[in-house]
């Protein structure tokens, strides 16, 4: 089935899928299927011919959510859940792909923007490469490092420093062609994470989002365990910067069910995205074992957002205490996000780090229930497609900037 998707907008969105079917494909879609927003007036769109025999929903869903690249395009994943346009834009940015403490000589597998990756170390060198043996395509993350490199479990090819093949057991005396070397990507370690960009120049300086106070001597550094969420990274990031959901989603952690009103605040554009200062009386962050802040204290939450999927939140506590949380949403696919969350703080440094991990995991789990059930799963950058109120200033700015950076109006549809 060959599908051409056309987007129309005039107070509504219509996805028109033209299906060209062979004559012997009996009882399948005969001509055109139109999906629209409910309660839409189609009078201004002309007359659309709809002649349906039958279609199975899961076939349509598979068409919309995945695209198999049939021609050889070496820089692209074989199976793509992003449009090629958005993929090329996204692949220029940096994302965390692993916790630094979990990376060793032994290979581990992961995924970034639909691209399967293998990560391993050779001495102090971190190698991030396509998780595919150039010989017959077996995942190298299934192999083991013998001290001189990662050994493919199929034919024993070995890959060492720089992802270069240094052994072909079937032909030990033969000069090894460069075609057997792995496709490697730019990678650096920062904030306790391994960051990677699929299209960045490996010799250029890595453009990693900044995290306030991380390098200051008075601050403790913590890196929470990673969390996998079945949602688009843009939806997850938008939830992190949303200030109107505290009372409803987080009443058991830091939100206050009796304090749901959102004071006005402003956003302002920065070089990498935008920032916002939100001041309210919503606190309830535990400080120490029995202190929960000062009565009537005005809590300042300073957000800094780096397009496309990273944000930091600096929380100003009583007595000049501060905590910074980085929300780094790594897009494994258009519907799967791996969340990384480094934290630094200048208080409670004597308490077990596991306490901080558990508290933040509880918050992430509260958010998971919401973000995994949002519809549509993609992020509509056209602000006319969803309703907004003043407390949505941050999410509205976020969507405007994503569009300004060239991403599709139906981001990750």
Image (cartoon, helix red, strand yellow):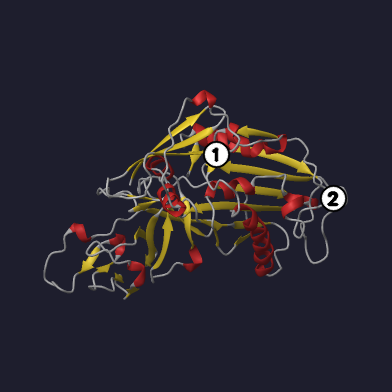
Residue 271 appears in view: no
Residue 25 shown left or right of residue 42 in the figure: left
Q: Which mark is residue 124?
A: none
- Closest to the observer, 258 or 42: 42
Q: Residue 169, percent across and down?
A: 18, 74
What element does badge 1 sit on? strand
Residue 85 location, quadrant:
top left
The span from disc 2 to disc 1 (Cα, nearest Å) is: 31 Å
- Closest to the observer, 4 or 288: 4
Label whose residue precedes the other's in the sequence (2 or 1): 2
* Residue at image mark 1: 380
Residue at the spot 62% in from the left edge and 39% down from the top edge: 395
How many labels were placed on the picture?
2
Q: Is residue 195 above or below residue 150?
A: above
Residue 33 shown left or right of residue 71 in the figure: right
What element does badge 2 sit on? loop
Q: Residue 384, percent across and down?
A: 59, 31
- Please name which of the two marks, 2 or 1, marks the residue nearer to the observer: 1
Residue 124 shown left or right of residue 169 in the figure: right
Q: Residue 370, percent across and down?
A: 64, 53
Q: Is residue 218 above or below residue 168?
A: above
Q: Residues within 10 Å of mark 2 (few under 14, many from 20)?
A: few
Q: Is residue 57 above or below residue 170?
A: above
Labels 2 and 1 touching (C-beta < 8 A) = no
* Residue at image mark 2: 258
Residue at the spot 53% in from the left edge and 60% down from the top edge: 192
Q: Residue 182, percent across and down?
A: 28, 59
């Amino acid at each position: 089935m060959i599908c051409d998707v056309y987007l129309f907008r005039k107070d509504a969105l219509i996805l028109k899928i033209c299906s060209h079917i062979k004559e012997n494909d009996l009882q399948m879609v005969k001509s055109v299927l139109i999906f629209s927003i409910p309660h839409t007036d189609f009078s201004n769109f002309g007359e659309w011919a709809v002649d349906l025999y039958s279609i199975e929903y899961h076939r349509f869903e598979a068409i919309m959510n995945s695209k198999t690249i049939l021609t050889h395009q070496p820089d692209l994943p074989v199976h793509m859940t992003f449009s090629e346009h958005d993929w090329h834009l996204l692949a220029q940015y940096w994302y965390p792909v692993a916790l630094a403490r979990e990376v060793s000589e032994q290979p581990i597998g992961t995924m970034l923007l639909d691209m399967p990756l293998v990560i391993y170390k050779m001495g102090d060198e971190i190698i991030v490469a396509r998780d595919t043996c150039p010989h017959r395509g077996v995942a190298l993350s299934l192999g083991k490092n013998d001290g001189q490199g990662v050994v493919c479990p199929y034919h024993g090819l070995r890959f060492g420093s720089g992802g270069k093949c240094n052994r072909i057991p079937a032909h030990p005396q033969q000069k090894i062609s460069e075609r057997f070397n792995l496709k490697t990507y730019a990678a650096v370690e920062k904030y306790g994470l391994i960051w990677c960009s699929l299209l960045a120049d490996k010799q250029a300086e890595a453009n990693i989002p900044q995290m306030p106070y991380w390098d200051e001597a008075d601050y403790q550094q913590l890196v929470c365990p990673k969390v996998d969420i079945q949602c688009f990274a843009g939806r997850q990031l938008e939830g992190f910067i949303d200030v109107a959901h505290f009372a409803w989603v987080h009443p058991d952690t830091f939100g206050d069910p009796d304090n749901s009103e959102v004071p006005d605040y402003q956003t302002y554009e920065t070089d990498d995205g935008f920032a916002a200062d939100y001041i309210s009386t919503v606190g309830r962050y535990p400080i120490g074992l029995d202190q929960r802040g000062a009565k009537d204290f005005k809590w300042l939450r300073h957000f800094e957002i780096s397009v496309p999927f990273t944000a930091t939140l600096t929380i100003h506590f009583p007595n000049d205490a501060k905590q910074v949380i980085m929300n780094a949403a790594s897009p494994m696919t258009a519907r799967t996000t791996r969340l990384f969350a480094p934290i630094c703080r200048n208080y409670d440094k004597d308490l077990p780090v596991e306490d901080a991990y558990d508290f933040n995991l509880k918050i992430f789990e509260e958010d998971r229930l919401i973000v995994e059930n949002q519809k549509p799963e993609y992020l509509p950058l056209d602000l006319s497609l969803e309703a907004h109120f003043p407390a949505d200033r941050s999410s509205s700015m976020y969507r405007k900037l994503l569009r300004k950076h060239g991403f599709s109006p139906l981001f990750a549809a």
